[in-house]
Image (cartoon, rainbow, N blue to C red):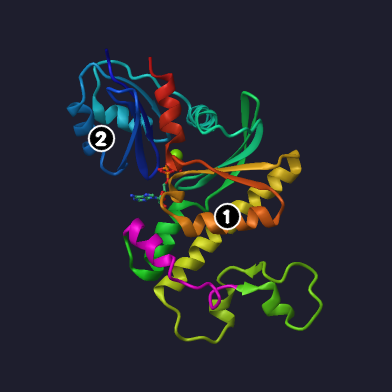
Amino acid sequence: MATKIGIDAGGTLTKIAFWDETNELQLLSFLSSNFKAVKDWLDSKSSLSSICLTGGRAEQLKKFLLSQNDIPYIVEFDATMAGVMYQLKHDGIRCEKAIIANIGTGTSIHIMEADSHSRLGGTGIGGGTLIGLGSALTGTKSYEEMIEVSKKGSRSSIDILVSDIYESNKLPINGSLTASNFGGVALKSIENRTKADYLAGIQGIIGEVVASLCIQSADAHGVNDIIYIGSTLENNSLLKEIIESYTILKQKNPIFLDKHGYSGAIGALLESK
Ligand SMILES: Nc1ncnc2c1ncn2[C@@H]1O[C@H](COP(=O)(O)OP(=O)(O)OP(=O)(O)O)[C@@H](O)[C@H]1O
Ligand SMILES: [Mg+2]
């Protein structure tokens, strides 16, 4: 029997989902700048594999693979939704209507209702911002190192909170909310900011921008659940905490799926014939 494989070739990472011999779901990822590694992996699998592609770089990967057969393709958003629905069912999470934020290189925001979905918008603030701004400010290049170091950081000298501005005045809104991400770097006279502090501040920008947009979308559409996915959440407990606490503060229900970045690849796998 041919091995079924779903591939999501994204802006930064190419994710692969496939069923192994025991019918267990297997997941792996490669940098999208290294299609050769993807090709080598595929070549190491049975030549009888049946592939379905998705993602913004699907066409580029298809050309690189120089496949004799035309490889089936599924639109990225359809694949992502199918992968999200599969995981909700598999994990026993009841959720009929939700806002979905895919925090990839950039962030795309959708609404899912019953079996249908539509795109509401997005923002260029995403995982690419974390590694781009992170390397510009700290010189650190590795994603893993950035998220590990960021956990040791403090945002107190980086950001300005509402309570920093209002001090003894009566607060019009919750004082613990961020009034200005990174504003503290200009306005607070503290000399010893560490790389960890800067990285924590960048995680703050991403988490709060994405969560704010999702909360506003949820309010506009009368939705309670917000599902956050994308590889930017991979091993990234700090970003999760920022998103989770802000979403809960705004009385919405944050949902994180275990296989964060793999929804598109799983959706493509489900389409693979
Ligand atoms: N090993 C890694 N190397 C680089 N970035 C990583 C890695 N693991 C996680 N990331 C994070 O995940 C982000 C990419 O997420 P994801 O794979 O969901 O996006 P993508 O599908 O490549 O992009 P898009 O959907 O926007 O085309 C990176 O920007 C980075 O923040
Ligand atoms: Mg993607």
Residue 83 x/y as whole percent: 48, 30
Q: Is residue 70 magenta?
A: no
Task: Say if 166 sits above or below 144 in the image.
Answer: below
**Looking at the rendered structure, which numbered label has been put on residue 63?**
none
Which numbered disc, 1 or 2, marks the residue that appears first in the sequence? Answer: 2
Q: Is residue 156 magenta?
A: yes
Left or right: 222, with 19 as reference point: right
The image shows residue 89 at horizontal and vertical percentages of 54, 28
- Nearer to me, 262 or 74: 262
From this view, report whether residue 163 is shown above or below residue 273.
Answer: below
**Closest to the observer, 35 or 59:** 35
Q: Nearer the viewer, mark 1 or mark 2?
A: 1
Q: Label 2 crowding class (10 Å Cα cut-off): few <14, some 14-19, many 20+?
A: many
Q: How busy is the neighbourhood of tag 1: few (under 14 within 10 Å), some, or many (20 plus)?
A: many
Question: Disc 1 designates what residue?
Answer: 243
Going 64% across and 68% down the picture, which residue do you hit? Answer: 178
Q: Which residue is mark 2?
A: 38
Is residue 272 found left or right of 95 in the rendered image?
left
* Secondary structure type for disc 1: helix
Q: Is residue 121 above or below residue 178?
A: above
Q: Quadrant of residue 173?
A: bottom right
Residue 7: % across, % down: 36, 30
Name the quarter where the N terminus is drawn. Answer: top left
Q: Nearer the viewer, residue 176 or 129?
A: 176
Please state if 169 lies on the left or on the right of 81 as rendered: right
Q: Position of residue 119 (x, y in %)?
A: 61, 35
The amino acid beneath tag 1 is Ile
Q: Residue at x 38, y 67 (%)?
A: 149
**Which residue shows up at 36% across the image and 37% down it?**
15
Indicate the quadrant where residue 250 lies.
bottom right
Real-space Cα distance between discs 1 and 2?
Answer: 32 Å
The magenta segment:
142-159
